[in-house]
Amino acid sequence: MVQLVAAGHSPEDAEAWAQKCDTWTKADPDAVNVFVAATVRMHRAFAERDPAEWRKAMVAAIESWVEYRGVPVPA
């Protein structure tokens, strides 16, 4: 998902693509939200330690996914 969004797909389009995968369709939405929240926190921490442009792009991609899903993530 993150790679699709980072490559320019919208979070909505990325999730629509994922609907083709049984694992995604069977995943508990709350578990996905926890994963999304943890992933954004992890990538923010990585970007703080090493602010390479690609890391910033990953943070931006994940943040757009967070926003799309409406996942609350502490700053």
Image (spheres, rainbow, N blue to C red):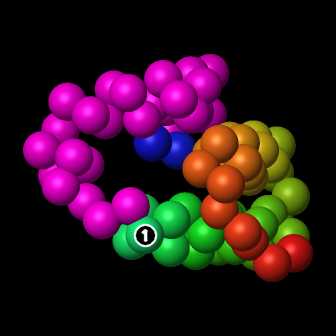
The residue positioned 58% from the left and 74% from the top of the image is 38
- Residue 63 position (above or below residue 49): above
Furthest toward the left, the residue is 22
**Range of residues picked out in magenta:** 3-29
The residue positioned 60% from the left and 25% from the top of the image is 10
* Figure quadrant of the N terminus: top left
x and y, in percent, of residue 62 in the image: 65, 50
- Note whether residue 69 is visible: yes
The answer to which of 62 and 54 lies nearer the viewer is 62
Q: Is residue 63 left or right of residue 25?
A: right
- Callout 1: SS: helix
x and y, in percent, of residue 31 in the image: 39, 71
x and y, in percent, of residue 68 in the image: 65, 42
- Note whether residue 58 is visible: no
Q: Give the residue pinned by disc 1.
A: 30
Q: Which amino acid does label 1 sit on?
A: Asp
Q: Report crowding for label 1: few under 14, some 14 to 19, many 20 or more residues within 10 A (C-alpha).
A: few
Residue 4 forms part of the magenta stretch: yes
* Figure quadrant of the C terminus: bottom right
The answer to which of 45 and 14 lies nearer the viewer is 14
x and y, in percent, of residue 25 in the image: 22, 46
The residue positioned 65% from the left and 62% from the top of the image is 71
Q: Is the magenta stretch mostly helix, strand or loop?
A: helix
- Residue 59 position (above or below residue 13): below
- Residue 21 position (above or below residue 10): below
Residue 67 forms part of the magenta stretch: no
Q: Is residue 48 left or right of residue 16?
A: right
